[in-house]
Amino acid sequence: MAIEAPYSRFKRNNQRIYAIVCIAFAAIFAYDGYLSRYEWSKRHSFYEKHAPQDKPDDTMRFNQIAPIFLAAVAAGFAGRFRALKGKRLLATDKELVINEKDRISYETIQKIDKTYFESKGYFTITYNDENGAEVRRKLSDSDYDNLGPVLDHLVTKIS
């Protein structure tokens, strides 16, 4: 029986919200920087105020340049959202799989420190890697949802 703990929905959704906010601000700045000069624009006075004689001041130049950078930042947040979508923690019968890359066999786990799990929401696993070096790994409930059952499964497998 495998127990899965997907990456935190809160953190994934924050990436989506950040991308949407960046796009919204990029649209506002693009409107002020490029479209406010036309007569049909309700903010025609913005263009007249910040670009007299068609020479834009610093505010207008910022409004013309910022959308490019904000769109790039929004693309970064969207890419991060896509990358986080597949992350998960999987406790199988023989090993703990972290993000499909790190596999920790239950035989190599030396101890599990769950002192702060109830109060701060994390626990620490100490194990030996393939080279024999001791590694401490901290797993937090702010990073993974459904971490409590994974911890219970780990404790029963180690005991």
Image: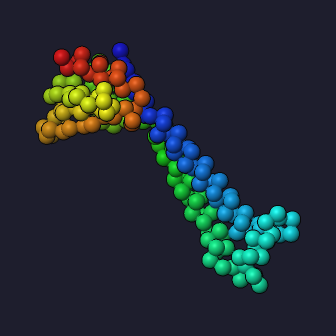
133 over 119 or under it: above or below: below
99 over 19 or under it: above or below: above
Q: Residue at x 57, y 63 (%)?
A: 69
Query: Is there any visible trace of residue 47 in the rendered image?
Result: yes
Q: Extreme left residue here?
A: 132
Q: Residue at x 82, y 63 (%)?
A: 42
Left or right for 101, reference 124: right
Query: Is there any visible trace of residue 100 in the rendered image?
Result: no
- Looking at the image, what colour scheme do you see? rainbow
Position of the C terminus, as image quadrant, is top left
122 over 92 or under it: above or below: below
Q: Residue at x 60, y 66 (%)?
A: 66
Q: Residue at x 54, y 57 (%)?
A: 73
Tell me residue 62's x, y (percent): 61, 71
Left or right for 140, reference 125: right
Tell me residue 1's x, y (percent): 35, 15
Tell me residue 152's x, y (percent): 29, 19
Left or right for 150, reference 44: left
Q: How many marks?
A: 0
Q: Quadrant of residue 127?
A: top left
Left or right for 15, reference 34: left
Q: Quadrant of residue 35?
A: bottom right
